[in-house]
Amino acid sequence: MLTPDFPVDLQRQFESEIINGSLPPGYRAPLQHIALREGAEPDEMRKVLRAAYRKGLVLLLDREFEVLEPAEPRVQSLFQHTSQAGLKPTSHVRQAVLEPASATVAWQLAVAVGSPVYRLERTRFVNEEVVANQVNFIPYEVCPGLEHDDLTQHSFQRLLEDKYHAVVVHIQEEVALRTADKEDQRILGLAPGSPVLVVQRLSLSWTRQPLVWADIHIRPDRYHYVASLWPQAANLLNDMQKQ
């Protein structure tokens, strides 16, 4: 079993002080000073500060850090967008496990190869119809304890923002059509050789650091949902049908 070497209790203490204003926006201090204040070892404090920078809570300067203003969410989650469109989104969490980051995942999330990341596998439904096979990869320090959270009826992005103080401010997306693999065939009910719509979404914080890399495989025939949830992907499907 992968055991992350990360000071979770110290992180919670430090982030709580930022959220409640004990460490207000504009507060600056050197590493040694904040480590002494928090009763922590410098190496542990350094890990927590790097995680806070990833989440957009602080800036890392030459020899000190600065607390930032709380970021306002700028990107709606798919759960929120679906609900506002009058649809009923749910998801089935197939597994949430810690694993060493592969080279591809490490590159996407800007972490070292082999460092602990969550692999969150979900089957997404809209109005009880299977729509997508989604796998999220998240650095452990963004949301330690994720495996204990209930995501069936809740937005994963909102969980990140409300519980773990990791606010998504920017996203980068790529869309493509591929041939469904065996997992897509099984989960999405597709025949061998069927096309599958792939959306790869990188969610970034205020400091433009990666929070989540999502690999989403969607049934193309659920066009009425795709057009609402992934307009860029809907355009790709339109182009395919014209060919």
Image (cartoon, grey):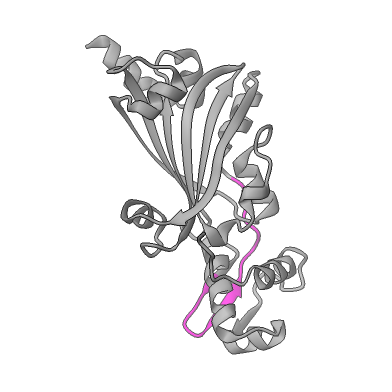
Q: Is most of the magenta stretch helix, strand or loop?
A: loop
Q: Percent from the top left, x then y, of residue 82?
A: 60, 25
**In this rendering, does residue 55 appear at all?**
no
Q: Percent from the top left, x then y, of residue 43?
A: 54, 82
Relative depth, front residue between 224 and 47: 47
Relative depth, front residue between 104 and 94: 94
Q: Quadrant of the C terminus?
A: top left
Q: Percent from the top left, x then y, of residue 97?
A: 53, 49
Relative depth, front residue between 24 and 199: 199
Q: Is residue 71 above or below residue 227?
A: below
Q: Percent from the top left, x then y, of residue 67?
A: 62, 71
The magenta region covers 59-73
Q: Confirm whether the magenta stretch covers residue 71.
A: yes
Q: Residue at x 41, y 13 (%)?
A: 221
Q: Confirm whether the magenta stretch covers residue 21.
A: no
Q: Residue at x 65, y 69 (%)?
A: 11
Q: Residue at x 66, y 77 (%)?
A: 27
**In this rendering, does residue 88 appear at all?**
yes
Count of numbered badges drawn on the protein: 0
Horizontally, residue 13 falls left or right of residue 184, namely right
